[in-house]
Amino acid sequence: MRSKKPLVDGSKTGPDHKFSSKFVAGLLDWNQNENSRQMPWKGEKDPYKIWLSEIILQQTRVEQGLKYYQNFISKYPDVHLLSNAPEDEVFKLWEGLGYYSRCRNLLHTAKFIAKELNGKFPDNHHDILQLKGIGSYTAAAIASFAYNHPYAVLDGNVFRVLSRIYDIETPIDSSEGKKEFSKLAQDLLPQNQAGIYNQAIMDFGAVICKPVPLCNKCFFNNKCKAFLQGHQDLLPVKEKKLKIKKRWLNYFVIRYKDQVMIRQRTGKDIWQQLFEFLLIETDENLPVDKIFSLLKQQYGINESIMINRFEYDQKLTHQYIRFSFIQMELSKKTSIPGFIWAKTKNVHAYAFPKTIKQYIVTQLL
């Protein structure tokens, strides 16, 4: 690891200021003449639509979030319609997007804006930041895109671009790194072009300065400090290694004639408020006979016939999940607290997590 170099000299006329000025000017020129990245919310000034797009894009690729944004705008074109929508309807529209706490926060904030603020979205950074589900990045994005207020955005794309342009090794997930990059991003921001600049640097990180960068297409490759040193593939640096939790979710798809048993998740775990089948979670991969033994012990179900078993894997940010779907047919109908019987042909109308929905579509219906 090489020694850390000072980032800027603090001078408004020194060499680092000139370097930064050239980068900003070049980025704005690239944005105007070469940036062909198209997204329906680019150039949008309605804070409601900007807010909606930013919440959808949290932890989500643009390609995946695009259709969700279009569906939400089509169904709920203003905050009043969203605030008055049935929660199950909104969760159904969100189905498959993941990180469902975003959807809960979306509903909470929509109701707050509609009822407490008479439908008027806050027009200053401080008040935007107070809204549930909005952090520093989202507040800066809304303030700059909707109102051109001078707040720099700092997302994964921006971290990556700045770490390479300035060859910064400070870990981006450390307290020191967050402060250092926040100051740099704010110092670079052209005060009267905040919205345009913020969108430009995010787009540049998404299409040119990608995780595997297209340095030969970069307008700044003759000055980029990391590129000139051959360090671009080593940046940005992260301090913490992600710990992945392994889970085994054994779902019993219990059917009786033309109905199937489901329930709504109510705990603080993943997929809160979405629907699922009867679940027995284990801390290891157990054989079917042992899982059936647990089913009998916990739910008293033993008069059934096993039809089939399907297995799926899903990787979340902090979790690796192994799904096992065990199809069963009851000889007589039973009742279990918290569960409802739904028509099998109508079960797709409920909001399920992505992998359960995949199972329903491919194996159940």
Image (cartoon, grey):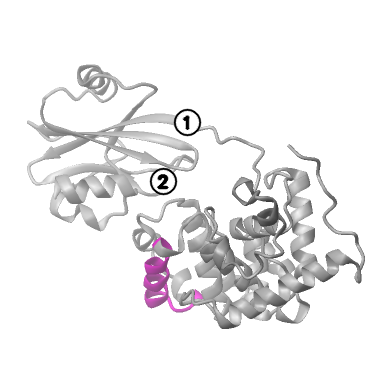
Which residue position holds label 1? 245
Q: Residue at x 58, y 76 (%)?
A: 47
Residue extent of the magenta highlight: 64-79
| The label number, if any, that marks residue 271 in the structure image | 2
Is-magenta flag for residue 69?
Answer: yes
Q: Is residue 1 above or below residue 83?
A: above
Answer yes or no: do the residues labelled 2 and 1 have beta carbons within 8 Å? no
Inspect this view and state whether residue 63 appears: yes
Query: Which quarter of the image is occupied by the N terminus?
Result: top right
Relative image position of residue 7 (x, y in whole percent): 82, 55
Q: Which element type, helix, strand or loop, lies under badge 1?
A: strand
Left or right: residue 154 versus residue 18 is left
- Is 286 in front, or is 190? 190
Relative image position of residue 284 (x, y in whole percent): 36, 21
Is-magenta flag for residue 169?
Answer: no
Inspect this view and state whether residue 133 appears: no
Q: Nearer the viewer, mark 2 or mark 1?
A: 1
Q: Residue at x 50, y 51 (%)?
A: 101
Q: How crowded is the residue under tag 1: few (<14 C-alpha within 10 Å), some, or many (20+)?
A: few
Q: Which element type, helix, strand or loop, lies under badge 2?
A: loop
Q: Mark 2 to mark 1: distance in Å? A: 16 Å
In which image quadrant can residue 182 be found? bottom right
- Is 103 in front, or is 310? 310
Q: Residue at x 75, y 44 (%)?
A: 175
In which image quadrant can residue 356 be found? top left
